[in-house]
Image (cartoon, rainbow, N blue to C red):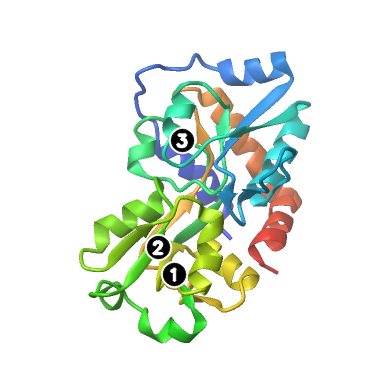
Amino acid sequence: MIGRSRFLAGALAFALIAPLPVAAGETLAAIRASGELRVGFPGDYAPFALADPGAAKDWRGFDVDVARAMAAALGARLVFVQTGWPGLMADLAAGKFDLGAGGITVTPERAAHAMFSAPVLEDGKVALTRCTDVARFTSLAAIDRPGIRVITNPGGTNESFDRAHLHIAAILVFPDNRGIFPSLAAGAADLMITDAAEARYQQRQTPGLCAVHPEAPFVVSEKAYLLPRDDAVWRDWVDGFLAEAQRNGSFAAWRARWLGEK
């Protein structure tokens, strides 16, 4: 668990300049005026936010629970806005949602065009493979070899990590993140490099798959909520909500439910 001082301080590092600044308090005022909190989710990343396909989408996950509680605290209706990893930043810039969620990693590239809330989770990239192959993929050097097939979803930090660190292994881009895991278990690829939280979750959900040393990721990163640039009033409200959720035990309950923490 991230300590409260670090939990609240994480978002303060991103006071950057945006091409289209948001007037102070504009987002919060718009939410209260409309009675709607619009949250953008890619919707393909368990355990953070997953939408079942179909006419009536059933949204579930850690960030879905957080967003529902945020909407209740605001006295607003939660509106699920479908976005995607390749178009996440463009959709935020176009004003399609008030807050981006669903397992978003803090990166310098994203922070250059948006603000982040205080971090909600420390995470990092690890290998996910068939349990029989765990001993083969304990390092990046062992992964980046001829004939090794690494599967990834497009447009997010998984693909960018693979392309930055793997120069010999084949990178297979699979369009639907939800379909990667049964394909991996069936032998369509040798492994996936993803966040430890997802690797642990899929280890619990997909028979035959195991996370490789999730306690010692290749790199360490943080997850937070994506917010419009230059609206410190809205950021401060979100950070205050998260701090209160940590204080009253709600945050621990969400983590226990979705991240398997006792």
Is the residue 7 above or below the residue 109 in the image? Answer: below
Which amino acid type corresponds to the residue marked 3 in the rendered image? Leu
Residue in view at x 47 percent, y 21 percent: 94
Q: Which mark is residue 83?
A: none
Which label is found at residue 151?
Answer: 2
Expressed as whole percent of the image width and height from the top left, the position of residue 225 reads: 54, 40
User: In this rendering, which labeled residue sits more in front, label 2 or label 3?
Assistant: 2
Rendered location of residue 240, percent (x, y): 63, 36
Mark 2 → mark 1, Cα distance in angstroms = 8 Å
Decide if residue 175 is on the left or right side of residue 233. left
Which residue shows up at 40% across the image and 35% down it? Answer: 14
Q: Quadrant of the C terminus?
A: bottom right
Horizontal side, residue 131 vs residue 248: left or right: left
Mark sitting earlier along the chain (2/3): 3
Residue drawn at (56%, 69%) of the image: 200
At which x and y percent is residue 171? 32, 61
Secondary-structure class at tag 1: loop
Q: Secondary structure at mark 2?
A: strand
Q: Give the Cα separation between the discs numbered 2 and 3.
A: 21 Å
Q: Is residue 240 visible?
A: yes
Amino acid under label 1?
Ala
Crowd around label 2: few <14 · some 14–19 · many ≥20 (10 Å): many
For residue 239, side relative to residue 54 (left or right): left
Residue 125 appears in the rendering? no
Could you say whether the residue bearing mark 3 is in a helix, strand or loop?
Answer: helix
Residue where numbered disc 1 is placed: 188
Are the two marked residues, 2 and 1, in contact with CB atoms closer than 8 angstroms?
yes
Identify residue type, mark 2: Ile
Q: Nearer the viewer, residue 75 or 137?
A: 137
Observer-side mark, 1 or 3, equals 1
